[in-house]
Amino acid sequence: AWMRGAGAAVARAAGCSGSEGEADVREAVLSLQSALRCDPKDPQVWEELGEAYHRQGKYAAALKSINRALELEPLKTPSSSPPSQRPEHLLAWSLRSLQLAETQLSMGQTNDATRRLQFVWDLLTNNQGGTASGGAEANVGVKEWIPPAWLRRGAARLLASALCARARDLRAEGATLAAKANLDEAWAALALAKASADEEEEERSAAAGRLKAMADVRMLQADLCFLTNHAQQPPPPEAPEDCVAWASSGRLEALKLLGEAGLCIEEALGKQGSGVGNTAASEGAREETSGKAGLWYDRAVLCVLSWVCVGGLDEKRKEEAKPNSSELQRMAIESLANALRISPKYPEAWRLLAVACSLGDLDEQKIAAARQHCLTKALAADPRGQGAAAAWADLGLLYLRKRMPARARKVLVRAQSLDPDLEEHWANAGLAALAMLPPDLAPRQLFEALALARAAFRQANEAAETEGRLPSLPALRCDAIASFCMHHLRAARLSAGEPHRGGKGEPTP
C-alpha cells in the first residue's frame, strides 16, 4: 500500500512542475520511508527512494539509498551459489548501477562514476547471447542473457557523458593525450549505440539525446585538436608560409570535427522537430521543449567555434570556407533566437548571444547596445549562477567604455563577490576606480582614490601568482601608474612643507 501511494505520487510529479511537483515528490519520499519501516530489506523500495531523493537534488541521500539497494541484491560471482543469475536480476542490477553512476556524476564524482559505467558497459556489450565466453560476464556468472538494446544505448550515453566530464578535467590539467583517449572511448560507445539504433526503432527523444551526446564528443575533440596544434612547436619565423600552414592545420581538423558535430545536431533537431512552440501540457512535453532549446543553443555554440576556426585560416582557405564568417554569425544568432523563443529565461543563450553580436562588422555603438541588452537579460534570468560573474564583469567593462565609471564599479563589485579569486575582476575594479577620478579632486582625496585603485591592481597580481601565472601586463602597468601618481602627490606635499599622512594601508614616509 505504501508503495502504491509512492508510485501514485511519483506519477503525479511526472505530470507537474514547480511547487506541485515538489510536493508530490515529498509525498513519495514519505510513503517510501514508511514502506521501509515495514520491510527494510526491500531493494526495490530503496531504489525508488534513491530516485525520489535524486529528483529533490539530495544526491548524498540518493547515493546512500541506491547503494543499499545494490547491497541487498548484489551481482553474483562464479563462487556464489548458485553462480548463474536470472535475466530480471541482471536488468535490475544494471539499471541501479546506471542510476548510481548518474548520481555520482551529479555530485562531481567523475572518476567513480566512470569506473562503474565502464564495468556496466563491458557487462552489457559482452553479453550478446549464449554462455559466458570471457570479459565481464565471465566474472559474474552470466548465462544466456541478451541485454535490451535500449539499455545499451542508455548506458552508452551515460558513459559518454562521464568520459567527456573526465576529458574536460584532464584538459584543464594539461593531459591532452589522456583526454583524447577518453573522448575516443566515448565516441566508440556512442557509435555502437548508433548501430543498435539503426537495427530497430528508437524513441525520438532518446535518439535526440544520443545525437547530442555524439555532437558533444565531436566538439570536445575539435577543442582538443585546436589546443594540441597550438601546443606543438611552430616552424621558425624565417619560413612564414610554413607558419601559416601550421596555424591553419589545427583549425582545419577542428572545422571537420565541428562539421560532424553540426550534422548530429541537425539530425537531433529533426528527431525532436525544429518547431519553437512554447506550450507544454506535461513534464515529458516540457522536457522535450527544453531539449529543443538546448539543441538550438548547441548549434549556436558550434557556429561560434567554427567562426573562431575560420578566422584563423590563411586568406585563401578563409575565402574557400563554407559557410563563411558572416554566414556563421547569422546562423548563430538565428539559432539563439530560436532557443530564446522556446525558453526566454535561458541565461546561457543570452550570454552567448552577447558574444555572437560582437562577431560581425556592425557599428561599435550598436554592438555595445546589443551586448548590454543581452547581458542584462542574462543577469535578470540568473544573477548568481554559473557564468554570472563573467557576465557582470563584461557588463562592467561596457559601462567603462561608455564612460559610466560609477555604474561600472558597482557592477564589477558584483563580479568580485561571485568570484573573488579571478585576477581579471580585480584589474577591472582598479580601472573603474581610476576612471572615477574627477579632475577637480582635492590632493588628499585623490591620494586615497589612487590607493584604492592600486590595492585592486595588486590584488589582481596576487591572484595571478596564486594560480602559478605571471601577472597580466595591463594590471602591472596600471599598478605602476597609480604608484607613480601617489609618489608624485607625496613629493608635492612634502615640498610644500605639508606633513604627509599615509592613506589606508599606506605608511607615513
Image: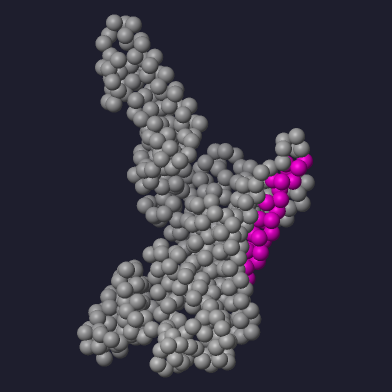
Magenta stretch bounds: 241-270
Q: Nearer the viewer, residue 252 or 283?
A: 252
Q: Residue at x 51, y 92 (%)?
A: 143
Q: Residue at x 56, y 83 (%)?
A: 134
Write down the quadrant of residue 263 in the picture: bottom right
Image location of residue 268, percent across then percent down: 59, 71
Q: Quadrant of the C terminus?
A: top left
Image location of residue 89, percent across then percent down: 42, 89
Image location of residue 160, percent across then percent down: 53, 69
Total numbered labels: 0
Dominant SS type (magenta) = helix
Using residue 232 as the reference point, say whether residue 426 is left or right of it. left
**From the viewer's perspective, is residue 276 above or below residue 469?**
below
Q: Nearer the viewer, residue 457 or 209?
A: 457
Q: Please check the rendered image and state whether residue 52 is part of the magenta-colored stretch, yes or no.
A: no
Q: Nearer the viewer, residue 361 or 26?
A: 26
Q: Please check the rendered image and state whether residue 249 is part of the magenta-colored stretch, yes or no.
A: yes
Whether residue 59 appears in this view of the structure is yes
Q: Quadrant of the N terminus?
A: bottom left
Q: Nearer the viewer, residue 181 or 225?
A: 181
Q: Residue at x 76, y 49 (%)?
A: 317
Whether residue 314 appears in this view of the structure is no
Using residue 311 as the reference point, say whether residue 47 is left or right of it. left
Image location of residue 73, percent across then percent down: 36, 85
Using residue 20 as the reference point, say whether residue 346 is left or right of it. right
Q: Residue at x 48, y 88 (%)?
A: 141
**From the viewer's perspective, is residue 302 above or below residue 245?**
below
Give the image's coloring scheme. one colour
